[in-house]
């Protein structure tokens, strides 16, 4: 009986060890995949940045990109408004007497 338990424990140990090795290998692949995705996003960001510069210079011909660039320009204007409003509100708050 004890021999069967020891044998079964050894089999379970081998499975656990194999699972750990496989899990580690899978983890390495996942880390590499995520790193490659990050690199891809950096490239896409660079492409977008260049497209926006071309759009602002009036040298972008693709209609799809123009639409996206127009949206970004509108967003930039709204962001600027929000920053101005925040700064204005901050100045007002700083002028209030603190008790």
Image: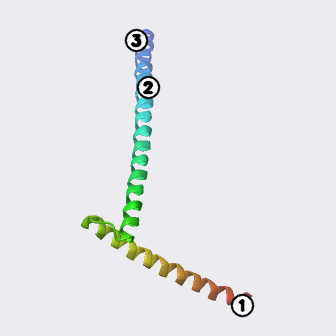
Q: Provide the secondary structure element on which disc 1 rests.
A: loop
Instruction: For marks 3 and 1, give the one nearer the viewer.
Output: 1
Count neighbours of disc 1 (C-alpha within 10 A) and say few if under 14, some if 14 to 19, many if 20 or more: few
Circles 3 and 1 in contact, beta carbons < 8 Å: no
Of callouts 1 and 2, which one flags the residue occurring earlier in the amino acid sequence? 2
Residue extending farthest to the left is: 63
Q: On the image, numbered disc 1 is attached to which residue?
A: 97
Q: Nearer the viewer, residue 40 or 60?
A: 60
Q: x, y percentage for residue 48?
A: 38, 60
Disc tally is 3
Kindly identify which numbered label has been placed on residue 4.
3
Q: Is residue 61 left or right of residue 38?
A: left
Q: Quadrant of the N terminus?
A: top left
Compared with 33, 81 (above or below) is below
Q: Provide the secondary structure element on which disc 3 rests.
A: helix
Q: Quadrant of the C terminus?
A: bottom right
């Amino acid at each position: 009986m004890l021999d069967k338990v020891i044998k079964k424990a050894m089999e379970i140990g081998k499975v656990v060890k194999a699972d750990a090795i496989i899990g580690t290998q899978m983890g390495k692949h996942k880390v590499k995949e995520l790193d490659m995705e990050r690199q891809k996003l950096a490239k896409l960001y660079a492409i977008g940045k260049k497209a926006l510069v071309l759009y602002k210079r009036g040298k972008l011909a693709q209609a799809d990109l123009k639409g996206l660039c127009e949206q970004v320009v509108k967003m930039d204007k709204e962001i600027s408004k929000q920053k101005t409003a925040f700064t204005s509100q901050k100045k007002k708050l700083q002028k209030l007497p603190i008790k």
